Amino acid sequence: MIIILFSMIAFAGCDASLKYNKIEILKYPSKLKYYIGIDHELDLSDGEIKLTTISKHFDIVNIVPFDTDGNGEFEIEHTIDFSIEGNCVVEICRAPDLCVSLTIQVINSKPSPE
């Protein structure tokens, strides 16, 4: 009985049905507008991602970027310059072939004079 249980645990990680094959944004971060001269870094902290396996099992995970020690859930890719107005794409990846993107906006904190 113990051997069977050990075998099930040992090989569970090899089961392709446990691998995530779909990623989607379940809840967008509340901060999608950033202001020139006020905001200086990306904040995705309250966003949520849904990761689904081939067997339709899913996990809901907060958008937590990897830090320099490898802790976190996602690789975040962007080329945002918080001093230039415009729309910027942020790519959130769990693996190289498992990514989703969202758009943030960098805007002037004061309306331009007319």
Image (tube, rainbow, N blue to C red):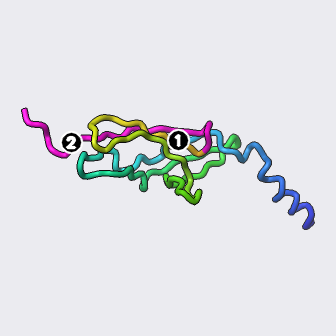
37 vs 4: above or below: above
Q: Quadrant of the N terminus?
A: bottom right
Q: Give the residue displayed 49% in from the left and 46% down from the top.
A: 76
In front: 67, or 61?
67
Q: Is residue 62 left or right of residue 109?
A: right
Q: Sort mark 1 into few (<14), some (14-19) or many (20+) by Cα contacts within 10 Å.
A: some
On whether residue 28 falls in the magenta region, the answer is no
Looking at the image, how many numbered discs can be counted on the residues? 2
Residue 7 x/y as whole percent:
88, 58
Q: CA distance from mark 1 to mark 2?
A: 30 Å
Q: Is residue 16 left or right of residue 65?
A: right
Residue 64 x/y as whole percent:
50, 55
Is label 2 in a helix, a strand or a loop? Answer: loop
Q: Give the residue displayed 83% in from the left and 53% down from the top.
A: 11
Looking at the rendered structure, which numbered label has been put on residue 108? 2
The image quadrant of residue 32 is: top left
Looking at the rendered structure, which numbered label has been put on residue 73? none
Q: Give the residue displayed 42% in from the left and 55% down from the top.
A: 46
Q: Amino acid at mark 2?
A: Asn
Q: Quadrant of the C terminus?
A: top left
Mark closer to the chain start, 1 or 2 = 1
The part of the chain drawn in magenta is 95-114
In front: 82, or 35?
82
Tag 1 residue: 24
Q: Amino acid at mark 1?
A: Glu
In front: 26, or 103?
103
6 vs 100: above or below: below
On whether residue 99 falls in the magenta region, the answer is yes
